[in-house]
Amino acid sequence: MKIIVAVTGASGSVYAERLLKYLSINNQILAVFSKNAIEIYERETGAALKEAVNIKIYDDGDFYAPFASGSFLCDAMVVCPCSMGTLGRIASGVSDSLITRAADVMLKERRKLVLVVRETPYNLIHIRNMETLTLAGAVVCPACPSFYSKPQTIEDAVDTVVFRILDLLGVDNDGFRWGNV
């Protein structure tokens, strides 16, 4: 699959790190990080951001990136983590960065868009923006770990969210399945 992964400046870079790890196995990944996301990613993960096999990183100001156009075919886009500021700009149709432009393209082309919101609690504006995006065809997936699988580590708990994201993207994975206990 060809998947766009956008990372914003919300805390939760570990979700992006684990998601990219799993997605890069059998998929072509086109990644874009906001300026704040790069700093937060490096601070939270302790690792420098770098391209890897099957991952091409684009600058958030690069409107010449292929996925800034609806003529570029891809299977899905995920914004993980998705800040409420980014969510609001996408909901309002403000395409002031490659991330928001690509999300706008996904909505207008009726392609799969998953927004992994991490901030909490929500105010009424956040809720209305999530409603607007849901009505427009996006999937809002709060980064809320589950505990059915009895995670033993932080990575195990993070993976409960990441495997849910993979399910929403249509990517096969070995995540916990209810009934398989």
Image (cartoon, grey):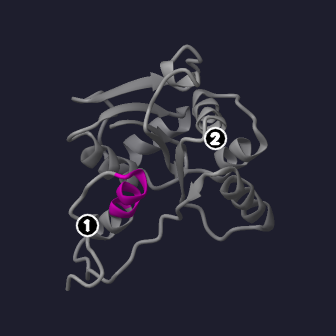
- Which sits in the foreground, 162 or 67? 67
Q: Relative to 178, is 64 above or below?
A: above
Q: Number of marks in the image? A: 2
Residue 105 within the magenta-colored segment of the rendering: no
Location of the N terminus by quadrant is top left
In the visual, does 115 lie left or right of 172? right
In the visual, does 106 lie left or right of 151? right
Q: Is tag 2's residue or tag 1's residue first in the polypeptide sequence?
A: 2
User: Which mark, residue 18?
Assistant: none
Q: Amino acid at mark 2?
A: Leu
In this view, which residue lies farthest toward the top?
64
Instruction: Give the crowd class for mark 2: few <14, some 14-19, many >=20 residues within 10 Å.
Output: some
Please give the name of the residue rendered at 33% of the width and 61% of the height, measured from the top-left corner: 163
Residue under label 2, please give it.
Answer: 107
Q: Which residues are magenta?
A: 162-170
Residue 104: quarter of image: top right
Q: Pinpoint residue 119: horizontal percent, then vertical percent.
A: 59, 62
Please give the name of the residue rendered at 24% of the width and 71% of the height, measured from the top-left corner: 153
| Mark 2 or 1: the one toward you | 2
Residue under label 1, please give it.
Answer: 175
Q: Pinpoint residue 59: horizontal percent, then vertical percent.
A: 50, 22
Instruction: Give the crowd class for mark 1: few <14, some 14-19, many >=20 residues within 10 Å.
Output: some
Instruction: Please say if the residues under marks 2 and 1 sit with CB atoms less than 8 Å apart.
Output: no
Q: Pinpoint residue 117: horizontal percent, then vertical percent.
A: 56, 58
- Which sits in the foreground, 44 or 154? 154
Q: Pinpoint residue 151: horizontal percent, then vertical percent.
A: 26, 77
